Image: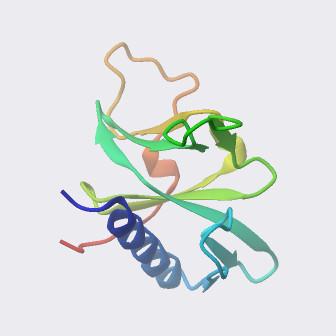
Amino acid sequence: MQHPKAIGDRTTMAIMLALHAQGWTTYVPFGENTRCDLVVDYGRRLSRVQCKTGRLRNGGVMFPTCSTYAHHGNPKQTRRTYEGEVDEFAVFCPELGSVYLIPIDDVPVTSRATLRIERTRNGQSRRIRPAAAYEIARLDLY
């Protein structure tokens, strides 16, 4: 089993590679406890980005959109959103080799979000986020 930090580091590196391939400059904030993992320079604006590892589940790429602290002894709060602290989520799905860039306003911020790879079984299309709309790169890392 891989250590969670190793998984997160690999995710961040894959995302940095995808952003670089798009021609965007990427800055890495200093310190372990910063709320954003990267800052992306789009030329006319900067964007604070939180990197997440997506998991392929039930026809979609699922990823957390908040931090959880329930595993800490007596936490003051069990969940903390990224509202006001990041502008986008960058998600790397190792199973697909895909990198997605999602504005924080496009996803719920209190638990997790899903980007659909396959159509839903019941054909629902309302409030569904198609993964293709957010994909910025496919990487062949493995």
123, above or below 134, in the image? above
Decide if residue 6 is on the left or right side of residue 32.
Answer: left
Q: Quadrant of residue 44?
A: bottom right
Q: Residue at x 52, y 29 (%)?
A: 128
Which quadrant is home to the N terminus? bottom left
Residue positioned most to the front: 73
Q: Residue at x 27, y 56 (%)?
A: 96
Q: Quadrant of residue 35?
A: bottom right
Give the total number of marks visible in the rendering.
0
Residue positioned most to the top: 122
Position in image of residue 133 (x %, y %): 51, 50
Q: Residue at x 77, y 57 (%)?
A: 85
Position in image of residue 132 (x %, y %): 44, 50
* Towards the viewer: 53 or 24: 53
Q: How is the image coloured?
A: rainbow
Q: Residue at x 52, y 53 (%)?
A: 134
57, above or below 136, in the image? above
* Towards the viewer: 101 or 34: 34
Position in image of residue 81 (x %, y %): 69, 43
Position in image of residue 73 (x %, y %): 55, 39
Which quadrant is home to the C terminus? bottom left
